[in-house]
Image (cartoon, rainbow, N blue to C red):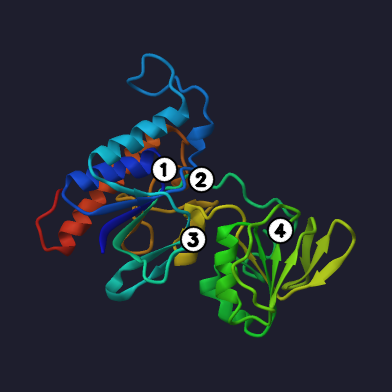
């Protein structure tokens, strides 16, 4: 059991982890190290660096600082978060063994902002009308129906595995991208490698139009493209979202109890200084919440 699990090892997540660890709590950071900062060649506007530093180096420095404090950092891809017993949460990772569980009292979402949402005609129009972002939440609506999962990685495989026991058929839509080998040999699973042109229907989604002119009838589509982001996890948990950003209160807590968000995923200026500030603020808020849970007097 962890006191806090942080998803994301960028400036927001690592900053929060440092504060939580220094307060004496057991914290785990899970990340695939896919921070947008890794693509920044030179950073020249961050306090304290006389010479430019690369984003990759800055991220590495932060991770090494956390490790020096004894923070456990796991390099895995998080594919889901679900409610556990006693108001706790279970964080699920790709290829997780059956006896391996990451249970926590609090969660911090800090994977950055979504920058690669699917740009396919019809997705926005049919959200909530056959297009979903959460197999755990919505699978039962599609019992014995034909559904598809848009994606080609571990995140998509995780959604497929949730749907196979319930749906009539499940099609993996790779949108012409290479896909990882599926762990399931279920006869209900199909793979479609065609490039998607648009999703169509009347009041509900009804079919997929491909660029080669062919179509496929469908009852529902689950979006699981790329790696799951903070926004994806927030949607699955039912947290409030506005304009593709997670809504938080003054303590960086989402509308879901004991689930926090910090950094680019909350909107505003997408800068390192803002991420560090929100990492600090969320870290202190989590410390206070954990002390409150333990009936210990907490900071004001």
Please tell me how crowded label 1 is: few (under 14), some (14-19), or many (20+) other residues with Cα within 10 Å: many
Mark 1 → mark 3, Cα distance in angstroms? 24 Å
Find disc 4 in the rendering and name its residue.
Answer: 174
Mark closer to the observer (1, 3):
3
Find disc 3 in the rendering and name its residue.
Answer: 94
User: Upstream in the sequence, badge 1 or badge 2?
Assistant: 2
Q: Secondary structure at mark 2?
A: loop
Is residue 296 found left or right of 130 in the rendered image? left
Is residue 3 found left or right of 42 in the rendered image? left
Find disc 2 in the rendering and name its residue.
Answer: 113
Mark closer to the observer (4, 3):
3
Mark closer to the observer (1, 4):
4
Q: Is residue 102 or residue 167 the one in the foreground?
A: 102
| Disc sitting over residue 263 in the figure | 1
Mark 4 → mark 3, Cα distance in angstroms? 18 Å
Mark 4 → mark 2, Cα distance in angstroms? 23 Å
Q: Is residue 3 above or below residue 134?
A: above
């Amino acid at each position: 059991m962890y006191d806090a699990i942080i998803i994301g090892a960028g400036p927001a997540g690592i900053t929060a982890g440092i504060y939580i660890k220094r307060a004496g709590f057991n914290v785990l950071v899970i990340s695939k190290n896919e921070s947008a900062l890794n693509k920044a060649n030179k950073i020249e506007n961050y306090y304290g660096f006389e010479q430019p530093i690369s984003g990759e180096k800055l991220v590495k420095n932060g991770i090494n600082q956390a490790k020096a404090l004894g923070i456990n950092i796991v390099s895995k891809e998080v594919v889901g978060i679900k409610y556990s017993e006693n108001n706790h949460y279970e964080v699920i990772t790709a290829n997780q063994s059956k006896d391996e569980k990451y249970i926590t009292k609090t969660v911090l979402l800090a994977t950055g902002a979504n920058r690669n949402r699917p740009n396919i005609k019809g997705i926005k129009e049919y959200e909530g009308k056959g297009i979903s972002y959460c197999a755990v939440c919505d699978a039962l609506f599609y019992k014995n129906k034909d559904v598809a999962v848009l994606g080609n990685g571990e995140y998509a495989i995780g959604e497929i595995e949730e749907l196979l026991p319930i749906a009539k058929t499940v099609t993996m839509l790779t949108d012409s991208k290479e896909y990882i080998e599926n762990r399931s040999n279920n006869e209900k699973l199909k793979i479609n490698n065609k490039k998607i042109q648009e999703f169509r229907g009347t009041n509900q989604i009804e079919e997929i139009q491909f660029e080669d002119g062919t179509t496929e009838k469908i009852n529902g589509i689950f979006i699981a493209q790329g790696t799951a982001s903070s926004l994806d996890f927030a949607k699955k948990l039912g947290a409030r979202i506005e304009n593709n950003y997670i809504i938080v209160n003054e303590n960086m807590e989402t509308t879901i109890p004991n689930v926090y968000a910090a950094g680019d995923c909350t909107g505003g200026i997408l800068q390192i200084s803002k991420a560090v500030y929100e990492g600090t603020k969320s870290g202190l808020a989590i410390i206070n919440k954990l002390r409150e849970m333990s009936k210990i007097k907490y900071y004001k």
